[in-house]
Amino acid sequence: METDQTILERCDLWGCIQCGKCTGGCPLSFKTTLNVRRLIYEALVEGDVNPDGMEELWDCTTCGTCVLRCPKEVEPVDVIVALRTELVDGGIIPPTIRDALTSVFRYGNPSLMQPEERADWAEGLGVKSISDGADVLYFVGCIPSYDDRVQKVAKALVKAFHKAEVDFGILGVEEKCCCNEVRRVGEEGLFEYVVEEQQELFSSCNVEHIVTTSPHCFNTFTNEYEGLDIKVQHYTQFVAELIDNGKLAFTGELNKVVTYHDPCFLGKQNAVYDEPRKILQSIPGVEFREMDRTRDRSLCCEGGGGRMWGEGTNPEERLATSRFEEVLSVGADIMAVACPFCLLTFDLAAKAGGYDEKVQVTDIIELVAEVI
Ligand code: SF4
Ligand code: SF4
């Protein structure tokens, strides 16, 4: 993206009728000064937008609600990402986001972790390297590789793969950040650099089928890795198939009331709504209950689009708090998620708000692993 062009030249905004449905649906506009309709208005009237000093640009989680709501097929979020690109190019970037980007460039992950420790979580689990040949590449992702809490999700998925006798391998220390969030904070150059390296790696290992832990990796591989001729699935799609065709059977019961929070990058942005629900409903003993805001009306957890790396302008007021009130209103014991960002964001909010005593936040695959 050329940042010497105006916003109007870089984003297709002429269809906008200023109806305001984008801002009306934006979950962040309720708690910060972020107003995407207004940014578009400024672009249309002034011909360009000067992003200097607009701290609220970093509040956007790139959840995609504004894109879904727009009746004129404008993609409002593009304006925010384009303006972030301008800021990044000019070196005006929140320090924590800058550190995450530098870490991706140096270490292949945003958390300043050592690349040689990337596969430590898999020690003793009988996981082979994809370079030895396998039907499926399990693309683990940065958070499940390094974060203590989310490593349990990766381990649960490995347990399910073994149980279903899936022939799978991992890239191990060679795996790098998928760069979905790198692109969303506006670092297009770094995104392109890593994509090229990662694509070469996939080719050299003859990868034909990728299964990801994270909806964010799934999204960027599916929609943004140009020329990637490989089948890509989020693990909920793959596991739902394993259950459907009898390869993964349950041996126990989970007598709990469970609800499900749709991750934005799986649901709103890729329309994967049914498979996670199918898995939950197939677990013996589970009573599944829907919250009011589900599927394409699901509430963003506030973890995506680089928000994991920065606090935003109003960190005190959490969207997650109202989400927990919904979970409690349907009487759920467990809030199931299917995304590392959602898991960490809700875990943190549950502890901060005291909801952890009433509701358990768990990834779907952890529930599956308990009863297979
Ligand atoms: S929803 Fe679409 S048409 Fe309406 S103000 Fe937003 S961008 Fe413009
Ligand atoms: S992507 Fe989500 S957070 Fe960003 S402007 Fe659109 S609705 Fe708001």
Image (cartoon, grey):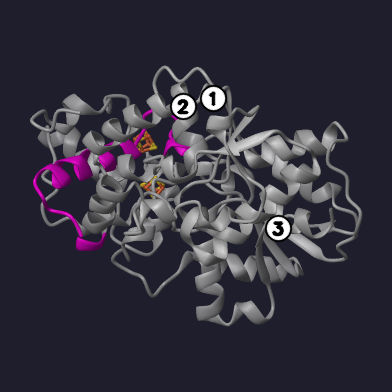
- The residue shown at (62%, 51%) is 338
Highlighted magenta segment, given as a residue range = 67-96
Taking depth in this image into account, of 188 and 287 the one nearest to the observer is 188
Q: Main secondary structure of the magenta part?
A: helix
Relative height, residue 298 to residue 257 (above, below): above
- Examine the structure image and report whether residue 87 is included in the region drawn in magenta: yes
The residue carrying mark 2 is: 202
Q: Are marks 1 and 2 in contact (CB under 8 Å)?
A: yes
Image coordinates of residue 153 in percent, x first then y, are 62, 56
Could you tell me which quadrant the N terminus lies in? top left
Q: Earlier in the sequence, mark 1 or mark 2?
A: 2
Label 2: few (<14), some (14–19) or many (≥20) C-alpha neighbours in 10 Å: many
- Identify residue type, mark 3: Glu
Q: Is residue 265 visible?
A: no
Q: Secondary structure at mark 1?
A: loop
Label 1: few (<14), some (14–19) or many (≥20) C-alpha neighbours in 10 Å: many
The residue carrying mark 1 is: 207
- The residue shown at (45%, 51%) is 142
How many numbered dots are placed on residues in this image?
Answer: 3
- Identify residue type, mark 1: Val
* Res 19 → quadrant: top left
Taking depth in this image into account, of 37 and 126 the one nearest to the observer is 126
* Res 49 → quadrant: top left
The residue carrying mark 3 is: 366
- Examine the structure image and report whether residue 162 is included in the region drawn in magenta: no
Q: Secondary structure at mark 3?
A: helix
Q: Secondary structure at mark 2?
A: helix
Q: Earlier in the sequence, mark 2 or mark 3?
A: 2
